[in-house]
Image: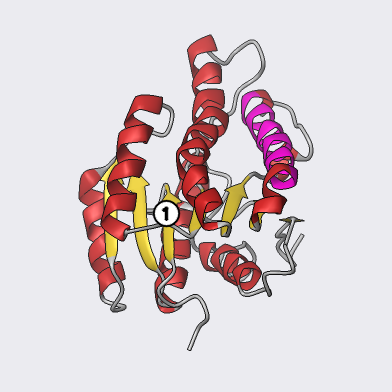
Amino acid sequence: MSKLKNKKAIITGGSRGLGKATAIAFAKQGIDIAITGRNEAVLKETVSELEEFGIKATYAVFDVSNYESVKHGIKEVIEKLGTVDILVNNAGIAAFGTFNEMDVDQWSQIIQTNLMGMYYVTKEVLPYLISKNEGDIINVSSTAGLNGNASTSAYSASKFAVIGMSESLMKEVRKNNIRVCTLTPSTIASDMSIELGIANKDSQDSVLQPEDFAELIVAGLHLPRRAMLKNASLWSTNP
């Protein structure tokens, strides 16, 4: 029996891609799950799939970039779950364009969603973990947060910032027995990557899959409480 059984998790952006794969991996461990996103129909479909594993699953519809919506949504799902033990900050958006070509509003929205959205959600969940003196927060950055590239200024800026925020938070809440892990995966064949044209869903043997990412998260959670996966990069074995 998994030591994670009956834990409660919130996964933002949990209805598809990396978030959905993580939710399924958690459900197989017996973890009850709340997923969040902006498309209620897709959230409902994913919840139905998760319930087939015999766990409790629920959802909330909100945009992580809107703090008032986050406050309401997080309160709603924690009331449904009863508590929270694990937070996976996965929700994010991406767009590519040169520094001058990308519209100012789009550049700002990437920062607002990827950085401020993670901050908003964590701010609302953290008091619950501190009160329990235990918990896990997994923040999803990217290799784009380790190295900038042409046409990725907004996305890289948001993911660099996520790393800085996560490492600062990690040092702040270790005393509360809360583990904060920052993940920096390279290209994964997620819905977003496929839609952006940077991954091919048919290249399963050469491109990382969402299930690979989920397996890493579960492995980190299985570490003894005295051990913490501070950060990790996930790369394909194929160049």
Q: Residue at x 66, y 45 (%)?
A: 142
Q: Residue at x 57, y 70 (%)?
A: 218
Outermost bottom residue: 1
Residue 182 pos. (x, y %):
68, 50
Q: Main secondary structure of the magenta part?
A: helix
Quarter of the figure that contains the C terminus: bottom right
Q: Is residue 184 magenta?
A: no
As drawn, 214 above or below 18 = below
As drawn, 103 above or below 9 = above
Three-letter code for the amino acid on which mark 1 is drawn: Ile
Which residues are drawn in magenta? Answer: 154-171
Label 1, secondary structure: give it.
strand
Camera-nearest residue between 117 and 130: 130
As drawn, 158 above or below 22 = above
Few, some or many residues within 10 Å of mark 1 (<14, 14–19, 20+): many
Residue 146 pos. (x, y %):
78, 40
Quarter residue 9 falls in? bottom left
Left or right? Give the position of 169 relative to 87: right
Q: Residue at x 70, y 60 (%)?
A: 234
Left or right? Give the position of 236 relative to 77: right
Residue 25 pos. (x, y %):
46, 71
Q: Which residue is mark 1?
A: 10
Left or right? Give the position of 84 relative to 43: right
Does residue 183 appear in the picture of this structure? no
Q: Residue at x 56, y 19 (%)?
A: 107
Camera-nearest residue between 64 and 68: 68
As drawn, 17 above or below 115 = below
